[in-house]
Structures are given as C-alpha cells and as structure tokens.
Amino acid sequence: MQLLYLVFGNNIQNHFQANFSILSFLRQGNRLLTGITVVTDAPDFYRHLAGAVTVHTIDAGTLEEWQGEFRFFWRAKIKALEFVARQQPEVPLLYLDTDTFLHGSLEKISQELAAGVAFMHEAEAPLSTLTSKTERRMWQQINGRAFGGITMHEQHQMWNAGVVAIPAGRNLEAIALALRICDDLSAQQVTPRLIEQFALSVALSETYPMQEARPYIGHYWSTKEEWNASIGAFLLESHLKQRSVAAELEALGSFDYQTLPVKKITRNTQHRLTKLVSKLLPPREVEFITPQVKK
C-alpha cells in the first residue's frame, strides 16, 4: 500500500498535521506500506522524515496544469492520485488529507483493498437528500444529466474525501473516470466547492464496492483547533528533546486519541454571535513592544 499526502503553502499547521498523520501510520506500517509520497511545494517541512517518505516537490506550473482548463484547485487531488498510481499501478493507493490519523487496523484496510474494496472516509448521504445550500444547488444542476458518461441519479452518494483508498485493480480506470466527471462538472459550471469530492464518490462507487474508512482513520476536519493544539505540543516536545523518528513512534504510543472529538458541528448562529461579541467587547489594554529610537 502506498500512502499519498498533498500539502500546499506555508501554513505550518497543515504540515505538522501531515507529519503527525505519517507518524500514526508508521507505527503499524513497516511491513504493510510500500512507501509514503508527499506532494508539496514546501519540502523543508519533511526533512525530519526523510528516511520514511519520498517528497515530490511540485512547482507552480505543474500545480496550474493539474488544476486543468477550468482552474479548479482541488482537481489537483485527483491528478496527484493519477501521478502516484501511474508510478506504481500494481500497488493499492491510500490518499489522506493532513487532518487525519490512523487509530484502527491498517492490516484490515490492506486486506479489504486486496479484495477489491475501495474506501472513502464516510458516506454522508445521497446528494439528492443533503440539505446545505451548496448541495441542494448541485443536485438541481446535475439531476438526471450525464457527466463523464455517468447519468446522475438519486442514489449517488456523497462521500467525505478526506480519505480515498483505491485498490490496485482498475485504479487508473477509476481515476480517469473521476477526472472526466470533475471536468464535465466544471465545464457545465456546476457549483464548484464539492466537485472533486463528488467526482471521486461517483467514480469509485461505479468501479468498486465501497466501505467507510472512519472505523480505522480519524478525520478531525471540524475540530482542528483542539487537535492542532495537542499535535503542536507533541511535536514541540519532540523538537526540544531532539527525538528521532523511532523515539517519536514510541512516544506516540502514549498519545490518547480518545480525549479529543473528531467531529463537532456548531450552528452558524453560534459563529455569528461569537464574532459579534468579539466586535462589541474587544480586548482591553493591548500592549506591544516599542522599539527604541537609535540616536
């Protein structure tokens, strides 16, 4: 099994999330992983893991090419899957968002992939039943129409794409189908925010039986603030103690994954009230250092 991460920009939180995720897989993966590929424009953040990962540095031109004719940024996720699958078409491929970690059995995932089962993080619901403004608009735009040669119907599920695991058999076929669906959705000006997610959902479900990765892999997309604080503390301690990767893996054995929520949905009203309170009650006595004037 080949792991794949796609990380852009200089936001250090994204990179320490990826480092932590990689460590969580290395604890189980020595005999199950053929390799770990990090596609990034910031390779310096992965020097510490140089013995465990292969960094593919991507430049702005390649990233623009991967975004395609319609400049849809997250099309690059599907192109990264294609890039790695072409290098090792005989190996199952497991893509992970940075805000993920392994808490279940990697061996079980490996066995299911070998049996021809694909994974995405979780099945959210058929797109036709989802209730957000974006999802309702998408369904109105695609209902009964063909994209990538697939006619969209009421049972096509929206899956969360924080995890995408593709068996070796028919992998390039499935990825090519996802690209065609994504490009057709873009060409027809379908609301773009969830296009790559839905394209992968449909392409994989049309090609393989599907399972949720949620029992094995945590995805804390809605609770990043809490997880970033704990992960940052763990990695800072590693830095201060100059831990080797082996020592980090040993220390990770004591990390309690169950104390932090992996999902927490708050109402938009709460966000609006929080912003309003912050505006009405700003902090007092804010003070900065004043530079001395040189004489």
Image (cartoon, grey):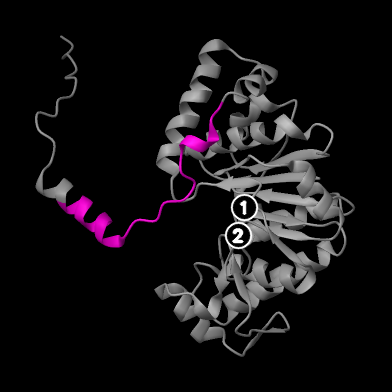
Mark 1 crowd level (few <14, some 14–19, many ≥20, 10 Å Cα): some
Q: In the visual, does 152 lie left or right of 137?
A: right
Any part of residue 10 in sight: no
Q: Where residue 220 sits: x, y (%)?
A: 50, 46
Mark 1, residue position: 214
Any part of residue 237 in sight: yes
Tag 1 secondary structure: loop
Distance of mark 1 from mark 2, alpha carbons? 6 Å
Mark 2 crowd level (few <14, some 14–19, many ≥20, 10 Å Cα): many
Q: Residue at x 75, y 72 (%)?
A: 177
Q: Is residue 251 above or below residue 295?
A: below
Q: Where residue 64 sits: x, y (%)?
A: 60, 58
User: What's the amino acid at mark 1?
Assistant: Arg
User: What's the amino acid at mark 2?
Assistant: Glu
Q: Residue at x 59, y 48 (%)?
A: 97
Q: Is residue 112 above or below residue 52?
A: below
Q: Which residues are magenta?
A: 255-276
Mark 2, residue position: 122
Confirm or deny contact between disc 1 and disc 2 (CB under 8 A): yes
